[in-house]
Image: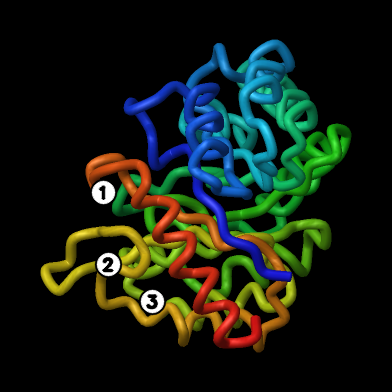
Amino acid sequence: MIVCGVSTACLFCRKLNEDAVAALDALGVRHAEVFLTSFSEYGEEFARKIVQNKGALDVHSVHVLNTQFEPQLFGAHPRARADAFALLHRAMAGAHVFGAKYYTFHATSRLKKNSAPMNADKTAKSLREIAAACGEHGVRLCLETVHWALYNEPGIFSALKARCVDLLGVLDVKQARLSGYPYPMYIKDMEGSIAHVHLSDVDDAGRICLPGRGVFDFAELICRLRDSGFDGALLIEVYPGDFGAEEELLRSCEYLQELLYKLGA
């Protein structure tokens, strides 16, 4: 069953995470992704604050500020890599406490124009180790489409999935657009392995807005996802300046839920 929810990233710097989950629950949002924002939020102690405040909110997935340790998980320096894995275990132990089953993962960065092409065998070896570490805490590793990170073009996921069978994927429609590739190419690449989708809309001027406020064809997206076998969460992820009152997040969820009902998804 496809469900709708909101990432706490939408409330970044508006509310701290423990207050953001309480606000989403109070609005009536039923599903969420918790976007952990700093080292002090990695671990079981902070996770218990989320549990205390989230009410009936189901935490579908966890995200972290990836540049803090994710690229170092692939590094050659043994001390830096060990520190990164220690942070990963802390973050996933916390995710287990507040019930997240999926980890939205950016992996390495591709910020340089002359970044070397991906070595699929070497990258997949690291991904298997990372997925195993997440699995110790009951969390699945999910590689996200990000135009400046590892999965920045179609074909990368399927190449890695063939070498790391436990890998799942995350489609971000905004990031797909920024990558220059049509999002259906990413759906095809991840077919049968998409854990959740990050949603945003875009207006006529190209500005990001909440789903239902712009020109993006969400009915087509939902149909394509359904036809690919998708049965996960549609999670709204926009920037805090892309909407006004927090109640607008609920209205956007309701817009998506109505579409799911009409489309029989």
Residue type at mark 1: give it: Phe
Location of residue 220 in the rendering, given as x and y in whole percent from the top left corner: 46, 87
The residue that disc 1 covers is 243
The residue that disc 2 covers is 213
Residue type at mark 3: give it: Tyr
- Label 3's element? loop
Q: Which quadrant holds the N terminus?
A: bottom right
Location of residue 166 in the rendering, given as x and y in whole percent from the top left corner: 82, 57
- Label 2's element? loop
Along the line of sight, the residue nearer the viewer: 99 or 176? 99
Location of residue 212 in the rendering, given as x and y in whole percent from the top left corner: 34, 69
Q: Residue at 31% x, 45% y: name it.
A: 239
Relative to 128, does residue 218 appear above or below in the rendering? below
Say whether marks 2 and 1 touch (CB < 8 Å).
Answer: yes
Q: Which quadrant holds the C terminus?
A: bottom right
Residue type at mark 2: give it: Arg
Say whether marks 3 and 2 touch (CB < 8 Å).
Answer: no
Give the quarter of the image for residue 245. Answer: top left
Location of residue 219 in the rendering, given as x and y in whole percent from the top left corner: 46, 84
Estimate the spatial distance between the alpha carbons at disc 3 and disc 2, rounded to whole Å.
23 Å
The residue that disc 3 covers is 181
Estimate the spatial distance between the alpha carbons at disc 2 and disc 1, rounded to whole Å.
10 Å
